[in-house]
Image: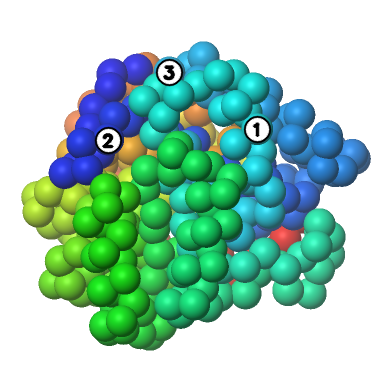
Amino acid sequence: MSDRVLGRTGLPVSRLGLGLAALGRPGYINLGHGDDLGARKDVATLEHEAHEVLDAAYAGGIRYFDAARSYGKAEEFLASWLESRGLSPGEVTVGSKWGYTYTADWHVDAEVHEVKDLSLATLRRQLAESRALLGPHLRLYQIHSATLESGVLEDDALLDELAGLRGTGLAIGLTATGPGQRETIERALEVGIFDTVQATWNLLERSAGPALDAAHAAGLGVIVKEALANGRLTARGDVAPLRELAHRSRTSPDALALAAALSQPWADVVLSGAATVDTLRSNLKALELDLDAELTSKLAELAEGPVRYWEERSALPWN
């Protein structure tokens, strides 16, 4: 896997990264997540399985790992893996996020799985927690799911704090979510303190593309999340035309969908959200695919409107 740098941060990354949303807690909204984890979902079992996926990712050339405070014990699992494998901060790049607090207490059927609070107090508390676990490995810290409605991009005190952290050498980013991703990213570019942006882009939801292109042109590192639409763009999903195109191309739907994201000229890193070694290895096959103009055109026909897409996503059950 060819190495690259993450925009103006200068941080070394790989084309494909690994997001830990499905690895650090027993419940998540990816299709089939519960089946992937199996019957045993105790902390020790999930940590062992997370280490197996992390090992497969590293062996496959992945060098960017993306966690969050709300991903259950994802930061803890990542930290124990880094220590047990003796990896130094220069050998991998770690990003995490603040803004959501995990509240499910290891229950898949919890009424509330996470609570969002993009306040200065939350930033300070969660940064201390992330640093306690990840230490010098933490190189990028991102606002989790910034939106215009949240007001986080208008909070002068919080933005000043982030700018100060950036001055210490910690790269600062944000992740965007919802049908207003494009407008959120455009506002972030006006604010001017961010080094990276992470957003949902996939074959169904392409609306952030122009803003991500502008962010890349401005020197920000661009990270693509949810490239498989929380499992909808896999063999388990509901997009039959993708399965047919994958069959014709002699590949899997997940590899084809990830290859489409990797082909975007503004995408520095595309995240795999694999919860098993087999899924991770299937995702890695995206790096071997070259999409011709005809296939690219057919894949473009799969796009949904952003409002419809985000309505479908909000209806996905935790499992």
Mark 1 is on which residue type? Ser
> Residue at horizontal 53%, vertical 63%?
126
Kindly report which numbered mark, 3 or 1, lies closer to the viewer in this rendering. 1
Q: Can residue 238 be seen in this view?
A: no
What distance separates the C-alpha of mark 3 from that of mark 1? 20 Å
> Residue at horizontal 22%, vertical 43%?
9
Which residue carries the number 1 mark? 80
Residue lying furthest top? 59
**Left or right of residue 116: residue 4:** left
Q: Can residue 268 be seen in this view?
A: yes
> Residue at horizontal 81%, vertical 68%?
110
Which residue carries the number 3 mark? 61
Count of marks overlaid on the render: 3
| Residue 8 placement (x, y as % from top left) | 16, 44
The dot on residue 11 is: 2
Residue nearest the observer in this picture, 31 or 162: 162
| Mark before the other along the chain sequence, 2 or 3 | 2
What distance separates the C-alpha of mark 2 from that of mark 1? 22 Å
Mark 2 is on which residue type? Leu
> Residue at horizontal 62%, vertical 54%?
71
**Left or right of residue 314: residue 154:** left
| Residue 315 placement (x, y as % from top left) | 63, 69
Residue nearest the observer in this picture, 224 or 194: 194
Answer above or below: position of 319 versus 277: below
Label 2–label 3 contact, CB within 8 A: no
| Residue 181 placement (x, y as % from top left) | 32, 68
> Element at badge 3?
loop
**Left or right of residue 156: residue 108:** right
> Element at badge 2?
loop
Residue lying furthest left? 217
Q: In which quarter of the image is the N terminus?
A: top left
Kindly report which numbered mark, 2 or 3, lies closer to the viewer in this rendering. 2
